[in-house]
Amino acid sequence: MKPSINIIKSSMATYLLTVILLCITSITCKRDEPIPVESINIQIPNGDFENWSWVPLPENWKTNSYPLSMAQWVTYIVKKDSQVVYHGAYSMKLIYNLTPPAWGAAPAWAKNKFAISEHPNNLRGYLKCNLQGTDTVSISVKILNNGITVDSGQWKSTVSIINWTEVNIPISNSSTVIDSALITITGGKYKDSTTTLANSTTFWVDQLYLIKY
């Protein structure tokens, strides 16, 4: 017996309704999927530490290192390193300042202030460190307007990081009027009882950049 026309129409209607429901479900699911967020990298002058002066000191960075001093074992505390590198030919290495106790211990530091037109969301980079005693190494970023800090972010570690590790430092976003950024990298200030340079707190940093979402 052939199916009646009403049964055929009913089956077709059910099929079409099912197709429509599937389409609606598919569209709804796609709307719920996260929309990809584009990002831009804001370059830090010599943020990959590939450029060094004849002194040698990292170009675009200010440091408390004085390589030309006769007592280099005391004052040369920010160095280029071609052996421990994440990317490129060099990384920046900060070591404990072996200043005599009477002068006081001075952590190595490097600072870079530069103009920016976009407000970054994060500071990213790669690092590793070998800490002695109860020491601390850190990286801070300040977003400035006319020399005044309007936003900031900071990272620090009190434990050694054996392998190269990516860090992602969130930056606050409370101001829309900005003109520059200041990045400060600070090494440790302790050494172990052997008093040898090899056993001083050591901090390596490489390939720093700012990112905006």
Image: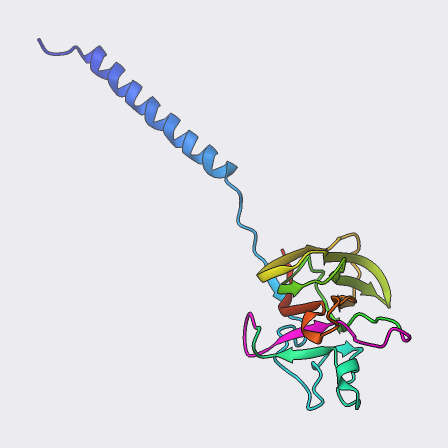
Instruction: Please state which of residues 145 and 78 is positioned toward the viewer in this rendering.
Output: 78
> Where residue 41 appears, x then y in whole percent?
61, 65
Determine whether 93 is above or below 123 in the image: below
Residue farthest top in this picture: 1
In this image, 59 relative to 19: left or right?
Answer: right
Q: Main secondary structure of the magenta part?
A: loop
Determine whether 18 is above or below 164 in the image: above
| Residue 180 found in image quarter | bottom right
The quarter in which the C terminus is drawn is bottom right
> Where residue 83 appears, x then y in whole percent?
56, 77
> At x 54% / y 76%, what residue is drawn?
88
Residue farthest left in this picture: 1
In this image, 148 relative to 80: left or right?
Answer: right
Would residue 196 be counted in the magenta stretch?
no
Would residue 100 be counted in the magenta stretch?
yes
> Where residue 66 appears, x then y in whole percent?
78, 84
Coloring applied to the structure: rainbow
Instruction: Please state which of residues 189 and 34 is positioned toward the viewer in this rendering.
Output: 189
| Residue 12 found in image quarter | top left
The quarter in which the N terminus is drawn is top left
> At x 25% / y 17%, what residue is drawn?
11
Instruction: Please state which of residues 24 and 154 is positioned toward the viewer in this rendering.
Output: 154
Q: Give, as a single range, the part of the protein colored magenta.
A: 85-103
